[in-house]
């Protein structure tokens, strides 16, 4: 029981961030929690898109709007390749991609600090602190290249929470890089099983990758997708920002069974035995 009297299967709340107290909800208690970055932990204020555009402008003299050629949840290698095809009209060579990656990272390293709309999602840091206090191993699973992922977390000083990660630079396939993250986690926790790993993300691609890797999926409606959309693609747990209503009924996908949908509440502490996600 938490100090608010909630049971371990209740949803708790860290201000406006989605927090799930998990002990006995039909899945193993989490030992490792892997977080997506963009629109799950932080909002970059368009810094990534501006940096891709600047890289294409410098190298090819053409403005590139990644939003016209890619969708949320794609990995950086996918973004670079698909945007190149869209604006240049052909497949890029490996050398051309390498130059774009380098220019993107250089621009991002400056732009992220100037991004006026950059923000940490409210309550995210508190959730990370409490997970660490509960002896949960924290990792990143991001479609961004490692350098970009770590750069995006720097203004918020969130890098200090994450022991390891897997990134778009490990694999352009999000499902594969999620499996890579779990494999890395086993090096820190030898008895770890995939169902003790929870993947937290805001897009259907995050949910699909978690399922492909055998992990539990937590869909958070912190980005462009609603709790209904995240439930429909099979998220095992879904939650939303404060102030919104929970549509009823919400059905889980047939392939993944019922989904627990919660109205979020703020609970200031997590008691012994409870783990906040």
Image (spheres, rainbow, N blue to C red):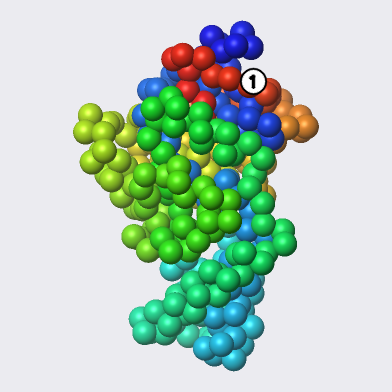
- What residue does disc 1 label? 267
Report the side of 241 relative to 165 (left or right): right
Q: Residue furthest bottom?
A: 61
Report the side of 248 relative to 213 (left or right): right
Res 251 → quadrant = top right
Nearest the viewer among 87 and 183 is 183
Any part of residue 69 in sight: no
Vertical placement of 173 versus 259: above or below? below
- Quarter of the image where the N terminus is located: top right
Residue drawn at x 57%, y 39% is 125
Residue drawn at x 43%, y 49% is 141
Nearest the viewer among 98 and 202 is 98
**Position in image of residue 133 (x %, y %):** 45, 27
Res 64 → quadrant = bottom right
Give the secondary structure at mark 1. loop
Nearest the viewer among 153 and 205 is 153
**Position in image of residue 164 (x %, y %):** 36, 47
Residue drawn at x 58%, y 34% is 126
Residue drawn at x 26%, y 34% is 189
Any part of residue 192 in sight: yes
């Amino acid at each position: 029981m938490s100090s608010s009297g909630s049971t371990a299967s209740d949803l708790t709340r860290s201000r406006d961030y989605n927090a799930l107290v998990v002990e006995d909800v039909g899945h193993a208690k989490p030992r490792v929690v892997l977080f997506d970055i963009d629109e799950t932990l932080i909002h970059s204020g368009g810094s990534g898109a501006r940096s891709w555009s600047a890289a294409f402008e410098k190298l090819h003299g053409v403005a590139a709007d990644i939003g016209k050629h890619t969708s949320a949840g794609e990995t950086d290698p996918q973004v670079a390749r698909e945007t190149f095809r869209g604006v240049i009209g052909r497949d890029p060579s490996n050398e051309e991609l390498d130059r774009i990656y380098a220019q993107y990272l250089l621009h991002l390293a400056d732009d992220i600090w100037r991004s006026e709309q950059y923000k940490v999602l409210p309550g995210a840091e508190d959730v990370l602190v409490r997970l660490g206090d509960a002896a949960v191993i924290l990792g990143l699973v991001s479609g961004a290249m490692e350098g970009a992922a770590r750069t995006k977390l720097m203004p918020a000083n969130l890098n200090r929470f994450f022991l390891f990660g897997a990134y778009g630079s490990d694999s352009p396939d999000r499902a594969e890089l999620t499996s890579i993250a779990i494999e890395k986690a086993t090096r820190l926790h030898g008895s770890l099983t995939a169902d003790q790993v929870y993947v937290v993300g805001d897009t259907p691609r995050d949910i699909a990758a978690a399922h492909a890797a055998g992990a539990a999926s937590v869909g958070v409606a912190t980005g462009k997708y609603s709790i209904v959309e995240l439930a429909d693609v099979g998220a095992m747990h879904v939650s939303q920002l404060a102030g919104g209503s929970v549509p009823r009924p919400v059905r889980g996908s047939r392939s993944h069974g019922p989904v627990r949908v919660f109205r979020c509440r703020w609970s200031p502490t997590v008691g012994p035995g409870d783990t906040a996600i």
